[in-house]
Amino acid sequence: MDATGIGLWGVPLAILGGAIRVSTPFIFVSLGEAITERSGRINLGLEGTLVFGAMTAYAVAVMTNSPWLGLLAAAAAGLCFGLFHGWICKFPKVNDIAIGIALMLFGSGLAFFFGKPFIKPKAPNLPAIPFGAWSDIPQVQAALDVNVLFLIGAALSLVLWWAFRNTRAGLIVRVVGDSSDAARAMGLDPNTVRLIATGVGGALAGIGGAYLSLYYPGSWTERISSGQGLMAVALVIFARWNPLGCFASALLFGGAGALGPALQSVGVTQGYYLFYAAPYILTLIIMIATSSPTRSLAGAPGELSITK
Amino acid sequence: MTDRFMLNRRQLLKTTAAGAALGLASASFPISRAFATAATVGFIYVGPKDDYGYNQAHAEGAAALNGIEGISVVEEENVPETVDVQKTMESMINLDGASLIFPTSFGYFDPHMLAMCAKFPDVQFRHCGGMWDKAKHPMNAGSYFGYIGMGQYLNGVVAGHTSKSKKLGFVAAKPIPQVLLNINSFLLGARSVDPAITCQVIFTGEWSLAVKEAEAANALVDQGADVITCHVDSPKVVVETVAGRGAFVCGYHANQSPLAPEKYLTGAEWNWAKVYKMFVDDLIAGTPLPNFTRGGLADGFVKMSPLGPAVGEPARKQFDATLAEMMKGGFSVIKGPLKSNKGAVVATEGQAFAETAIELESMDYLVEGVVGSTA
């Protein structure tokens, strides 16, 4: 081994660094979807919201030269998408899954349309905090450059986990998600609660998109997401609608995604397609191991159209 | 649903443009028929046409046709390599009256373009990179490609001089012959400077996966690679990530130097304008279009990005000398004695494969010094 490379240590370091770098969009989209699904709706459109958020953030950052304004704009755009979904779904006999798929295509298409002039310009990036400054090894420093959004995402998952259990708002969302009838008996309007929950979920997905275009990989192209929004929606089920679980599974997916390139970089070059499939194989195994034919998924909101 | 929308949009644009043109023409030119379009040429891209990469290179070539009198260009981007591309071709032929179509992505050829060739025998189809074979394929089909491996060899020469760690990196999409030739050429170019240099390759498995490409670039830098190049559809992410980590980068497909002016050494670029003009000249002249077109640096099919500020004097000298040698034609990157990285002999002593050698188009090995595997 030579002095410049770090050899096999590169693998755990890449998994750690990858988990931090890659996971953030997963964290935000899955937390947003967790809120929405806890209220009894599924919003599959978050992939479209993610892409539109990425485009909006980049465009606004280019025009105003401020990544923070871009982030804000992405959240606002995501909020609009979420509210739109929530508004349509309040009408009777509307299928939330079908609307979600329509919004997914609509969001991506709209982002491509408006995003054309912003592929070439360069936007300022969101700042990172150099937690690796204590180390002299540049690889460690690079892996521990942690973006503020990752920290916000981590904090948010804790707060949400606590809020679902202990706050009035959290209980309202859960009641609406578990039984519309019970919610109505309590004097709550399920549609309003779901509208707000879907709106907040959309805003979080928009922030996830801003991370993609303004930090990592840090540019706007039409292929920026490559299905991460959809994967994050699936993560929510994997995480059993638990915000802490969302955070953990996002980290797992991020780290597992870094495994393939890292192994190839240290010379384990056979079977890389298999390594790339690792996160999905892992998901399958955990899903099979934890599911049961005799009961519904633990933690699933009762009003969710996939569990009804 | 999407297709119908696109048809409508196309029709709408066509009608409005035709209406506007008609109004303009009748106002200023009494004899408007003399200015009627002689031929319409269609271009189909698999991704966005301003991707700093493969599609942008083709779109720049298509844009070069705009000034030619009597030629109008229609383009469609983001067309998947599925039955969608057949619909696009049909609409270009039926609605726009295209008589020559360039489906530019590898996966368009078989079966999509071939199906259209059979359905529209009067329309000419030319495919980028596909292996047109006189025995198997119709005469209104054809393929064109450039020897861009030469450009990667020159990238390697500059990389070999610039690298301090003697480790290079390559972010590759899929292990197909064109990609393998580029990887091998990059390393052999570097080894012409210092035979101790190695090149680490990472395959991402897809032509465009922004996050995985960024991870691959980070992993290569982590392992000490200090000059990195790539063969993916859009090198933007790789160039920005590598430069952000402080390593040097060589470009591919198009000129990416605006993305990293300090760290960009040089790059292997397509010059499709030359190729497309050639085809269109034949079309206007009414001569049959060639079916099998290939060319390299000497033919103007491929060009190099201007050398960046970090390129030193010895690198510049060897770059210029090698380029001059290549411009004479017949330069061989793969020449014996040469082994693959699995130890198999790929070229014996005295054996050399010139850029035109058809064997290179079925390459299935990585040469000694490349750390990586084709499967």
Image (tube, coloured by chain):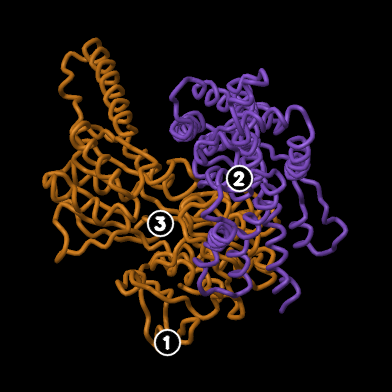
Chain colours: A purple, B orange
Residue found at the far right of this picture = A134
Nearest to viewer (mark 3 / mark 1) = 1
Q: First in sequence: mark 3 or mark 1? A: 3
* CB contact under 8 Å: marks 3 and 2: no
Q: Amino acid at mark 2?
A: Val
Comparing labels 2 and 1, the label whose residue is closer to the camera? 2
**For mark 2, does the 10 Å Cα neighbourhood hold few (<14), some (14 to 19), or many (20 or more) residues?**
many
Q: Determine the residue positioned at 32% across, 31% down.
A: B6
User: Residue at (59%, 33%) from the top-left corner?
Assistant: A53
Distance of mark 3 from mark 1, alpha carbons? 29 Å
Amino acid type, residue under disc 1 in the picture: Val
Q: Is residue A36 above or below residue A6?
A: above
**Discs 3/2, front:** 2
Describe the element under mark 1 as helix, strand or loop: strand
Residue indicated by mark 3: B302
- At label 3, counting other C-alpha atoms closer than 10 Å, the crowd grade (few under 14, some 14-19, many 20 or more) is many
